[in-house]
Image: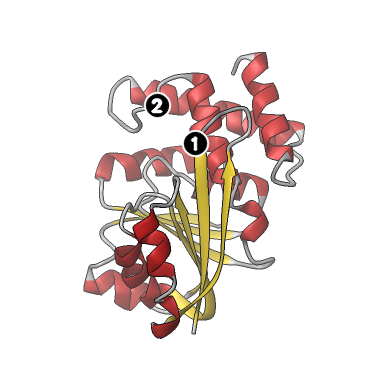
Amino acid sequence: MEIENKRLLVEGAKAFGIHLDEKAVEGFDLYLRELLKWNRKINLTAIRSEKGIVLKHFLDSLSVYPYLPETCSLLDIGSGAGFPGVPIKLVRPSLEVTLIDSVRKKVDFQRHIIRTLDLKGIGTIHGRVQDKEIIKSLEGQFDAVISRAFSNLQTLLTLGSPFLKKGGVLLVMKGEMSSEEIRLLSHIERTQYRFRKMVSFVLPFSSFKRSIILFGKR
């Protein structure tokens, strides 16, 4: 990773209350190099520059850090090339993380990067969260469910619910919220969720507008 991009990573992480020590920076550096290497052969991400990955993948993933429960088991739905689950694991080693994605090549990369970074307490599942067998095996097991891969908020609310413990947190990572999605939030109280908060911000060193929406399961 170029020196300037390392600076962006370290300084950007500070905006979310995260101090990246040398070991963590080395982990992100290795992650980036492996992602770029794999991406030359199979399409894991449309973002192909070091700076783009640091800003749009690494820092975006870390932006949710302040809103995670202190002790937490986390399910990352539609985790793709490991985002946000793997970056979160790098800065919260005690977190128990499960990644799930329906695309085999992305799960293969997840398993590769977990081995390469020698991460413990993190696993992967190849499949769809709608699958009855997956729901049955993971039902009610997680303190938190997260996703930044779903464009449809209502769909994610439905898909995430079976995996959450009572009182668990669903964290939705999105771009700028549309007026229609904001209106939807006012109806959440009538469902199995309680709307907790929405945080809107701009990613450090960029103009990328992001939103994090938190729901508590009743």
Quarter of the image for residue 154 reads: bottom left
Is residue 190 toward the left or the right of residue 116 in the image?
left
Residue at image location 44% in from the left, 73% down from the top? 186
Is residue 115 toward the left or the right of residue 201 in the image?
left
Query: Relative to 103, is 185 above or below?
Result: below
Residue identifier under label 2:
47
Residue at image location 49% in from the left, 36% down from the top? 57
What amino acid type is highlighted by mark number 2? Answer: Ile
Image quadrant occupied by the N terminus: top right
Query: Relative to 194, is 93 above or below?
Result: above
What amino acid type is highlighted by mark number 1? Answer: His
Q: Residue 57 carries which label?
A: 1
Is residue 147 toward the left or the right of residue 69 in the image?
left
Element at label 1: helix
Residue at image location 40% in from the left, 84% down from the top? 190
Q: Earlier along the polypeptide chain: callout 2 or callout 1?
A: 2
Say whether residue 50 is visible: yes
The reply to whether callout 2 and callout 1 are in contact (CB within 8 Å) is yes
Which is more toward the observer, 204 or 31? 204
Quarter of the image for residue 41 reads: top left
x then y, percent, for residue 170 = 48, 67
Element at label 2: loop
x then y, percent, for residue 85 = 50, 50
x then y, percent, for residue 14 = 74, 39
Which is more toward the observer, 120 or 213? 213
Residue at image location 32% in from the left, 68% down from the top? 159
x then y, percent, for residue 140 = 44, 79
